Amino acid sequence: MLGLLLLSLVTGSAAPPPTLSGFVDAAKLMSMCKADGPDAEAGQAICTGYVIGAVDELMAQQARRDGSRRTICPPKSMTVNDVVAAVVKYSRFAATAQGIGAASFVRFAMEDAYPCHVRGGGR
């Protein structure tokens, strides 16, 4: 629970509810994204696929929101490599993110990497 609190404080977002057992959590996703050794290519491919799917869903959710309620505003030039790099950059929080689902972790990373700025400052 401390990890959820710390992640919430760092990102300014409410902590998501604990995930269901059996689903990928943040630590497992990061272990795949940063895999090395003989299974590195497979782990990294799973990471990339997971991140692409999570971001695709996030962007669909964002598109249904009024512009002032969007929390992720990537540039039109964003690539798959940019997205995976943003999530991996956020991996420093994975160790304290016990119980946070990988999809929520991807959302936090995307909100941090590509925040929406509204007039008057802030998100």
Image: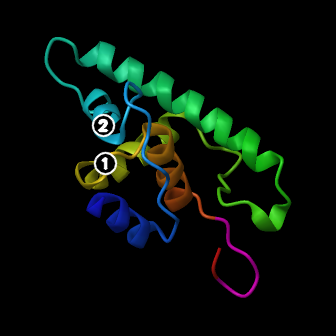
* Extreme residue in the left direction: 37
Residue type at numbered disc 1: Ser
Which structural element holds mark 2? helix
Q: Which of 86 and 15 is in front in this view?
A: 15
Dot 1 alpha-carbon crowd within 10 angstroms: few under 14, some 14 to 19, many 20 or more:
many
Residue at the spot of label 2: 30
Asked if the magenta segment contains residue 10, the reply would be no
Dot placed on the residue nearer the N-terminal end, 1 or 2:
2
The image quarter containing residue 56 is: top right
> Height in image: 10 above or below 47?
below
CB atoms at circles 1 and 2 under 8 Å apart? yes
Residue beneath the point at 80% across and 68% down: 68
In the picture, the disc for residue 36 is: none
Residue at the spot of label 1: 91
Residue type at numbered disc 2: Met
Is the C terminus in the top left, top right, bottom left or bottom right quadrant?
bottom right
Residue beneath the point at 49% across and 53% down: 16
The location of residue 109, given as percent across then percent down, is 47, 52
Q: Main secondary structure of the magenta part?
A: loop
> Height in image: 28 above or below 70?
above
Residue beneath the point at 33% across and 67% down: 6
Residue numbers of the magenta segment: 116-121
Dot 2 alpha-carbon crowd within 10 angstroms: few under 14, some 14 to 19, many 20 or more:
many
Seen in the image, is 42 located left or right of residue 58? left
> Height in image: 51 above or below 6?
above
The image quarter containing residue 116 is: bottom right
The location of residue 1, given as percent across then percent down, is 30, 58
Seen in the image, is 3 located left or right of residue 47? left
The span from disc 1 to disc 2 (Cα, nearest Å) is: 6 Å
Counting labels gives 2
